[in-house]
Image (tube, grey):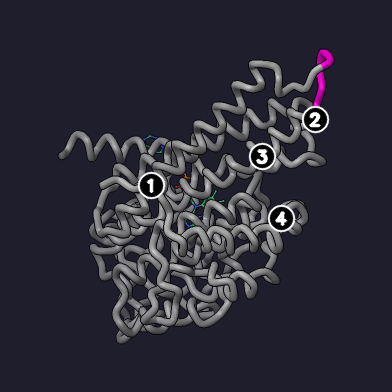
Amino acid sequence: MLDFSLSDEQLALIDAARRFTREHILPVAAACDRRGEFPMELLEAAWKAGLLSPTVPVRFGGCGLGELDNALVCEELAYGCLGIEAALQCNALAATPILLAGSERLQREYLGRLAASPILAAFATSEADVGTDVAAMRCRFERVGNDYVLNGQKAWITNATLASFHVVFATSDPKKRHEGIAAFVVERGTEGLTPGTPEDKLGQRACDTATLTLEDVKVPASHLLAEEGKGFKLAMETFNQTRPAIAAASAGLMRRCLDECIAYAKERKTFGTAIASHQMVAAMLAEMSIRIEATQLLARKASWSLDRGVRDPIASSAAKAFGADAAMQTATDAVQIFGGCGYVKEFPVEKLFRDAKLLQIYEGTSQIQRVLIARQLVNR
Ligand SMILES: Cc1cc2nc3c(=O)[nH]c(=O)nc-3n(C[C@H](O)[C@H](O)[C@H](O)COP(=O)(O)OP(=O)(O)OC[C@H]3O[C@@H](n4cnc5c(N)ncnc54)[C@H](O)[C@@H]3O)c2cc1C
């Protein structure tokens, strides 16, 4: 049986996320973008509404939402501001490896904290020279007595300066590549752990992104999340689980583009008629709608599979690649429909255009999604 309908609970969840977006995100999004700052003041409201870390299981005090539910939330939040959505959703990125590999004690402590308080978390694989090629990381760990000691620098870390804890991937020896990588949970404020100055970014500026420097950072052995040789696989499994939510966020951004464009195209007149009645403009609106529909289907199918325990990396990567590319094309067309007004900050689509670009870069670029899909196709 194939059923595309959403449950009453899911429709209520969409309503709640939409209300939160209208009341808490839309009013502050432009100012946060201008200042390049995450609005910490909305964290508590997001937590109270059950929209922060929603996938933390009930047994740890969380809402226990599935991946499909989470995708529905991401789509609504991204409609308001992709940068704010990315910062909030980063909690799921940090929670997922703990859920997948954490000891009962680590899960109780860190998932419990995500459920019990309005905090942010971070996830760190990337370094200045290492993004796509995760196995090439150079941040080191070594066992010293009962502790691990971490040294190196992570780069591009979402929530780096705001997170209460970080999931950090490091290697025993860069020459070992995949075989050397382990993962740890590192507390904010641990001696030797220093977040850098937030990056001055093109888009998604409301989300904090910075380096994380580790100098002789002592991590207790109990905070080992994945032992040497298991960290790389854990990172890949995490991305497999979180990529559909990026596709969902892409759909949210595209819905916003379409709404802004419909309103503008009905209002703006050229040659004595609304530009919406020019076929080439109307065709761009129709293409946007097609991309939204296709992205929602891919995102929801990939999330639905995850909820059923079906491992389908092609579905996750396809949703992420298609959604990100569709969002970039849609935001480009939105600027086009606004003409000159699309190119200035006074109108909303300029921000949507800048925000969209990052979808094609983080959690695996659009190119690497295709590499991953092709590898699955050839090797099965
Ligand atoms: C704002 C922002 C937030 C981020 N948040 C996080 C975070 O929270 N945690 C984290 O760990 N990382 C984060 N990242 C890092 C992000 O995941 C990397 O930037 C991304 O994976 C690309 O890596 P890179 O920048 O090193 O590019 P590179 O790996 O140097 O790639 C450069 C170009 O080469 C292409 N390329 C590389 N290898 C191949 C290949 N084999 N085949 C085809 N093309 C290839 C890429 O697609 C890209 O176009 C973030 C990045 C940004 C910009």
For this view, does 317 lie left or right of residue 54? Answer: left
Question: Distance of mark 2 from mark 3, alpha carbons?
Answer: 13 Å
From the viewer's perspective, is residue 162 above or below residue 5?
A: below
Q: Please tell me which residue is depicted at 57% across the width and 64% down the height of the picture.
A: 159
In the image, which is nearer the foreground, mark 3 or mark 1?
1
Q: Is residue 242 magenta?
A: no
Query: Quick one: 195 or 22, which is closer to the camera?
Result: 22
Tell me if mark 1 has few (under 14), some (14-19) or many (20+) residues whose alpha carbon lies within 10 angstroms of its own.
few
Instruction: Give the residues drawn in magenta, as a range.
Output: 268-272
Give coordinates of residue 47: x percent, y percent. Answer: 57, 73
Question: Distance of mark 2 from mark 1, alpha carbons?
Answer: 35 Å
Question: Distance of mark 1 from mark 4, alpha carbons?
Answer: 29 Å
Q: Secondary structure at mark 4?
A: helix
Q: Secondary structure at mark 2?
A: helix
Q: Please tell me which residue is depicted at 50% across the width and 62% down the height of the picture.
A: 90
Q: Which mark is residue 259?
A: 3
> Quadrant of residue 22 in the image?
bottom right
Q: Which residue is mark 1?
A: 4
Question: Distance of mark 2 from mark 4, alpha carbons?
Answer: 22 Å
Q: How many marks?
A: 4
Q: Which mark is residue 267?
A: 2
Amino acid carrying label 3: it is Asp
Q: Which residue is mark 4?
A: 26
Tell me if mark 2 has few (under 14), some (14-19) or many (20+) residues whose alpha carbon lies within 10 angstroms of its own.
few
Confirm whether residue 223 shows in the render. yes
Amino acid carrying label 2: it is Glu
In the image, which is nearer the foreground, mark 2 or mark 4?
2
From the viewer's perspective, is residue 301 above or below residue 104?
A: above
